[in-house]
Image (cartoon, grey):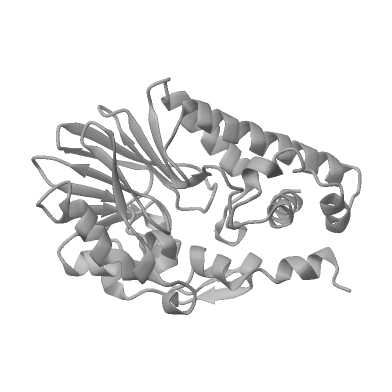
Amino acid sequence: MFTNRMKLALVPLFVVLFLLTGSYSEGQDFSKVQVEAIKVSGNVYMLTGTGGNIGISAGKDCVFMVDASYAPLTGKIKTAIGTISSKPPKFVVTTHWHQDHTGGNENMAREGAIMVAHENVRKRLGSEQFVEFFNRKIPPVLESALPIITFSQDISFHLNGDDIFIFHVAPAHTDGDAVVHFRKSNVIHVGDLYFNGLYPFIDLSAGGSVDGVIAAIKQLNVLCDSNTKIIPGHGPLSDKAGLETYLKMLVTIRDRIANDIKSGKTLDEVIASKPTRDFDPIWGKGFLKPEQFVKIVYDSLVKKK
């Protein structure tokens, strides 16, 4: 009979493909994916399909893009952008290194787009990575897919009648997370700091932690008002109320598991206590199952301790 630890090791392949790998053809039929452009506010749009949500600012200056999703979707992404602007993407800002957000970088760079990211994203994309939760090595990308402009704390663009402020948060989902704030449009693309409607994957191997994600969400919440539109890394368009609901879920589950750890419970015992039970009907139907999320939170807190 499998223990909970053994069961958690049998993470479905599609989860790994969804987040990390470049072996796309093994796990998904991208021919059936539809990429749709949704107007958010001002000149800002959100592209949805599969992989990470894409942000677009399109105006008189250029097309400014946040994340590039999977490589096989580049053609469909360009078609969706074509419904907004006749211009090709000039800048592509990467929110973090995972391949469901960076797979299309090489294609975009080949067509002239300038890649921008936090310096840790370039380091991780340019070297082999090991993601312990999935027990998987991730090979480095080609040099042409690397960001050629990097920043340590923040960088600003003044385009399309907007002030676009990009800033790094302390390690949260990874150690290279960047948030893109379209200030005049009152839109924030938060990358995988926010999984709207599903339990988040936190990449502990890349410096992430549950406490880091909570701290980042609290930081983001201060930037929002009741009219702010939030583009999450995954899930539908959101707002301040949605972000606060997500924060409450994270804090409650973190605190429950922290108390269990303090009382000496093992991972199997914590899983058996079902600390996510009242949140599962809403958050537990995504690609990451409740038991897997509990393991991530548990491991994050034990590692901190």
Q: Does residue 77 appear left or right of residue 135 in this picture?
A: left
Vertical position of residue 104 compared to residue 217: above or below: below
Question: Which quadrant of the rendered structure holds the N terminus?
Answer: bottom right
Q: Is residue 264 visible?
A: yes
| Left or right, residue 174 beside residue 104 | right
User: Is residue 114 in view?
Assistant: no
Q: Position of residue 181 (x, y in %)?
A: 33, 35
Q: Is residue 232 above or below residue 49?
A: above
| Residue 149 pos. (x, y %) | 26, 56
270 left or right of 160 in image: right
Residue 213 vs residue 268, the one in the foreground: 268
The location of residue 8, given as percent across then percent down, is 73, 65
User: Above or below — where is 144 with respect to 151?
Assistant: below
Q: Residue drawn 30% across and 73% down?
A: 143
The residue positioned 43% from the left and 65% from the top of the image is: 99
Identify the image quadrant of residue 252.
Answer: top right
The residue that appears at 20% across and 59% down in the rendered structure is 79
Question: Quarter-wise, where is residue 249 in the image?
Answer: top right
Q: Nearer the viewer, residue 287 or 71?
A: 287
- Between residues 269 and 37, which one lies in front from this camera angle? 37
Residue sticking out furthest to the top? 226
**Residue 179: percent from left, percent from top:** 39, 42
